[in-house]
Amino acid sequence: MPKPLVWVDGKPLLEHVILSAHRAGVNVFVIVVGDRAELVRRHFATKNCSRLTLRWVENPEYEKENGVSALQARNLLREPFLLLMGDHLFEPATVKSLLEQPLPEGGVILAVDRKLDRIFDLEDATKVRLQGDLVTDIGKEIAPCDAVDTGMFLCSHGLFEALQTSLKDGNCSLSDGMRHLACHRRLRAFDIGNALWQDVDTPQALAYAETLFHRFLSSQQGPDSTQSELA
């Protein structure tokens, strides 16, 4: 099964991502798919998406780093735009607050979590070093660090310029692009405070996410909720 279709608390991961962003006011989604893309598209073809616009982009080089996937969408996005991971759960209020931040010209704002003592599997998390609200470095091996990357970004097209510059042998990660932006003081941090989020990378993280989000996700269900939009 493609990872975006792994179920968490009654819905596939990607469906949670779309619904949470929709509740924050997002109606148009550009979704980059790769491995077993037809299964992901087929799932959403069976859903009521009448209030949403879903645009699909296939990345034929999906075995490469995630920066290559992001570059596939560059011609379909107007700035500012959100960049979200297909396997990260989050609260709609966090995305709504991120969308309200003033975006620096040519820059990116990264939502970060400073609650290092509460991070599940901190060793595997993408870490961030800060100077005020400026990100000065980002990566999994940073020590010490001030926060972790939550996988939620408010972006200008400067993101794509940074990724293009960071390509080596046709490959780059999002963190490579973010480091380029950080070196030019164009990567800022937005602290999510006490908001919930979780990267679902392993069976253990999946179990933790279901426990963490069960009460919150259950409270969003109901006939008057946009959580039923993809029924």
Image (cartoon, helix red, strand yellow):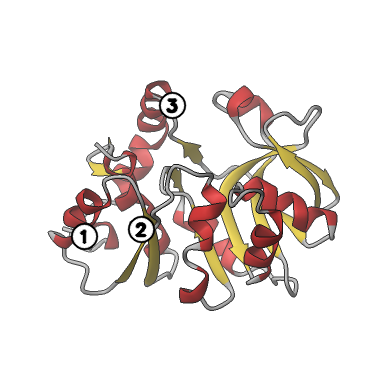
| Residue 12 higher or lower than 180, as above or below | above
Q: In the rendered image, is residue 221 in sight?
A: yes
* Residue under label 2: 18
Task: Tell me if I can see residue 192 in this picture.
Answer: no
Query: Which of the two labelled residues, at mark 3 and mark 1, occupies the earlier sequence position?
Result: 3
The residue under label 3 is 205
Determine contact: label 1, label 2, CB under 8 Å.
yes
Q: Which percent across, then down, holds residue 68?
A: 53, 54
Q: In which quarter of the image is residue 22?
A: bottom left
Identify the element where label 3 is drawn: helix
Q: Which residue lies furthest to the bottom in this view?
A: 78
Q: Which amino acid does label 1 sit on?
A: Leu
The 10 Å Cα crowd at callout 2, few under 14, some 14 to 19, many 20 or more, is many
Classify mark 2: helix, strand or loop: helix
Residue 62 horizontal/vertical position (percent): 42, 47
Spatial CA distance of label 3 from label 1 is 25 Å
